[in-house]
Each structure stands twice: as C-alpha cells, then as structure tokens.
Amino acid sequence: MISAPWLFRIRGFRRFHGYELGPLIFVRKPLEEAPENLVVHELMHVWQHQHRPLRLWLSYLWQGYRANEHEIEAREAVRKTSG
Ligand SMILES: [Zn+2]
C-alpha cells in the first residue's frame, strides 16, 4: 500500500480516496490515516484482480462505476467487516 496524494490530483482520480492497480493499493492520505474501510474495499479489488482480471477491467466498460458488480462486492466486504 502506497500513499500517493499526487495521484489523486490527476483529473479522473480526484473523486477517489483509494485506487487499486494490480497488487498495489494507492491511497490519498498518509498510510497511518487510511481508513480501515477503505483498505478493506481496495483489498477486495486486489482479490478480484487476482482471480478475474479480465472480467474486472471489462466490467467497468459495460457496467460503469456505481452499479458495477465489483464495486458492489467491495462495498459488501466493508459492510461485513465493519462494526
Ligand atoms: Zn472500488
């Protein structure tokens, strides 16, 4: 996991607080301040990437972001592990 505030200043990344890229997770905040829920969410994407990389990438083309099955799964992982 890498703290990369510069990444989130780039157009297209501004709306994100974390971003998964293969085995790497980039977060906007310093690592010690990264919210646990964000880490869980991004770790779910790492798992998805390892198990179905092509389907993960393509899904954003035809499902968009909000209703994307992988986003729903990542949000569900946060729901199950928080509180
Ligand atoms: Zn996500």
Image (cartoon, rainbow, N blue to C red):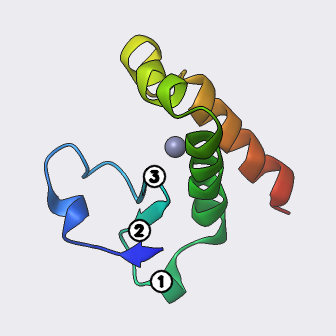
Please tell me in which quadrant of the rendered image residue 35 appears.
bottom right
Query: Of callouts 3 and 2, which one flags the residue occurring earlier in the amino acid sequence?
Result: 3
Up/down of 76 relative to 1, above or below? above
Q: How crowded is mark 2: few (under 14 residues within 10 Å), some or many (20 or more)?
A: many
Identify residue for label 2. Answer: 27
Please tell me in which quadrant of the rendered image residue 5 appears.
bottom left
Identify residue for label 1. Answer: 31
Question: What's under tag 3, amino acid-wise?
Answer: Gly
Identify residue for label 3. Answer: 22
Could you tell me how far apart the alpha carbons at marks 3 and 1 are, in whole angstroms? 18 Å
Please tell me in which quadrant of the rendered image residue 70 appears.
top right
Identify the secondary structure beneath mark 2: strand
Question: What's under tag 1, amino acid-wise?
Answer: Leu
The residue at the far top in this view is 62
Up/down of 31 relative to 41, above or below? below
Could you tell me how far apart the alpha carbons at marks 3 and 2 are, in whole angstroms? 14 Å
